[in-house]
Amino acid sequence: MRLQQDLAPGRHGGLKLRHPVLVAAGGAGYGSELLEAVGDDPPGAIITRSITRAARRGAPPPRMAQLPEGLLHAVGTPNPGLEAVLHRQGPRWSASQVPVIVSLCADNVDDIAALARTLEVDPDAAGMELSLECPDRGRGGQPIGLDVEASETATVAARAATDLPLIVKLCSAAPDVRPIARAVAAAGADVISVSGSTRAVGLDASRQRPALGSVYGWLSGPAVKPTGLRLVYEVAQVVRIPVIGAGGAHTLDDILDYLGAGASAVGLATAALAEPTRPGRLARELEAWGDDHAIGRIDELVGRALPRGKDRGSLRASSFRR
Amino acid sequence: MVTTTATAPRATKTSSGEEARLLDTRELTPGRYLQAWAAPGIARAVQPGQFVHALSPRAPGLLLPAVPVASFDRVAGTVRTLVASRSRPARSLLEVRPGESATFEGPLGRGFALDPRSRYLLVVSDPDGFARVSSIVDEAVAGGRQVTVLLGARSVVEVYPSSLLPDEAEYVVATADGSLGHHGDISELVTPYEAWADQCFAAGSEALLTRLATLAKGRDGRMGVARLGRRRGRRPDPGGPEVRRRAWLQVALRHEAGCALGVCAGCTIDGADGPVRACREGPAFAASELRWEPGS
């Protein structure tokens, strides 16, 4: 089975992946340590930890707690700022064959444009991911991605500032991601990414205090895979651009599920932290599975589970929420 | 961000691990277990203060627990770990039965740096931190140095038996309830040793380490460390081993689980010159490499 694909064929140079199993934001840091660890078993691409315009300290410790249900984490956005990251990490990205997509986080439109312009002139980044999970300063700190108009404005600002392949990451907490996905695609996104990670709270072993220093965190791991699948399933029915799904994927079955729900590529984060070579290994397993089942190209697996009629699955999901 | 120089030893996680066979588990104090493992590769390479990532076949987790190597025997090819049952990540190791194996990745991180000129060492810990410092005691005693170990616990039931330490080491205990040894905090016993000790190694609660760091800073002024030649010559590279070797106080920080690649940011803390990662730039640091919040 042919695994190669171009997620952004309309852009100069495109966003060409050797295979569809990526390391999603949060699982790769800034990429260089991961690239060092994977050796000859690289992921299809790397999406970096979210980076801001100015340096940030991140969340107070403890930042991670392993629960029976999954991994609870709240690291904030600790980073030295985009220019510092590009200066230190960029040359290592260029030296690698793996596309490195830079995830950006901004709390207003001006910052989004400034970040995208900085990235535009950097020769080392293969693409940009704009995270709509980031708080919108103008809306009382609510994530940008909760609002259709704010999501559209943010995407327009990024698109206007760069010709790099643009991935827009939707906010998993949005009550309905479909209008936001439509708006983002119309505003110029090349790819949409979604993650099943969900807001959560855990307690430490004494049960006398929260497990995380910032109290609230994100739950990742196998428990959130159905949430990730739901987001992919809904978004893939309303846009005509590729979707990257993430959340709880760590086996070949998970990859096949995400592809079937409509994802063109699948991101691993928590599973890649535990085993950096897992994305590469899963890609080999996927290729062998495809050969065994006489699948010629990866596209043939994408969206097999989507309803064939007009938007039926999404309408059912909408009814359920009411 | 503190960067590590090319010359600094840094153990990096790889995709391969060693199958460590459990030889024995015994409960040392309530809820704390000493486990002996046959792991020749780890035993050969480990340095005091380093840790391993341990994957238990009985309870595979999402992130691997970071388990400090409490002691090691390079000749016998064994290592010992000290695990608290209330530590969620590490307690899966307690389900491994003698004869069964767990996968150990490592040794990881940067350990302590013992100055070859140091003759008198002070080691300070609480029961949680003991596993991080006990191997430096073994190494120092084996090298002919004089070592005093100060252990502070809440009560006598938390105090480890002296058989864990080499006979040559002096062992001094303080308990908060006065049930054994000095009645009070262990940091109160450090002052009499500050002039005697060439170096001090510590691990334990943030409050204990903060008190020690404050004391060490004052000691540098009182003892005129600069004039004793510790800062003679060129200024050591930030993050390099020289900084730790020249420091009077080195601390090993606790981090329970993570990627050990330096990418998850779960163990990132405030360093003196920016964020540092306990799994990569640490877990052993010179006290001066970290930012200490007074009163914590």
Image: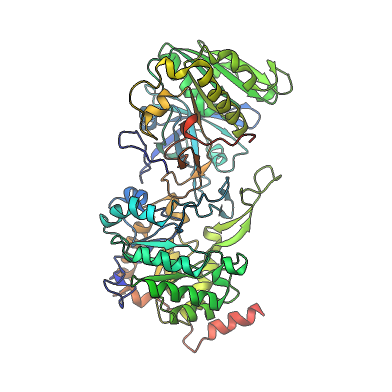
Is residue B128 in sight in this rendering? no
User: On the rendered structure, is B35 left or right of A120?
Assistant: right
Q: Does residue A115 lie above or below A180 as drawn?
A: above
Q: Residue furthest bottom?
A: A310
A112 and A242: which is toward the camera:
A112
Image colouring: rainbow
Q: In this view, does B157 lie above or below A101?
A: above
Write the residue at 57% across / 58% down: A218
Residue A39 in picture, x, y percent from top left: 29, 50
**Residue at the (59%, 39%) spot, across then down:** B87
* Direction from residue B270 to residue A290 in the image, left or right: left
Across and down, in percent, residue A259 comes to 42, 72
Residue B32 horizontal/vertical position (percent): 61, 31
Answer yes or no: is residue A317 visible.
Answer: yes
Out of A120 and B49, give the one closest to the viewer.
Answer: A120
Image quarter in which the N terminus of chain A is found = bottom left
Give the residue displayed 67% in from the left and 80% down from the top.
A322
From the viewer's perspective, is residue A13 above or below residue A315? above
Report the number of discs: 0
Residue A60, horizontal then vertical, whole percent: 58, 47
- When the figure is inspected, residue A150 is found, relative to residue B239, above or below; the finding is below
Q: In this view, does A135 lie to the left or right of A23?
A: right
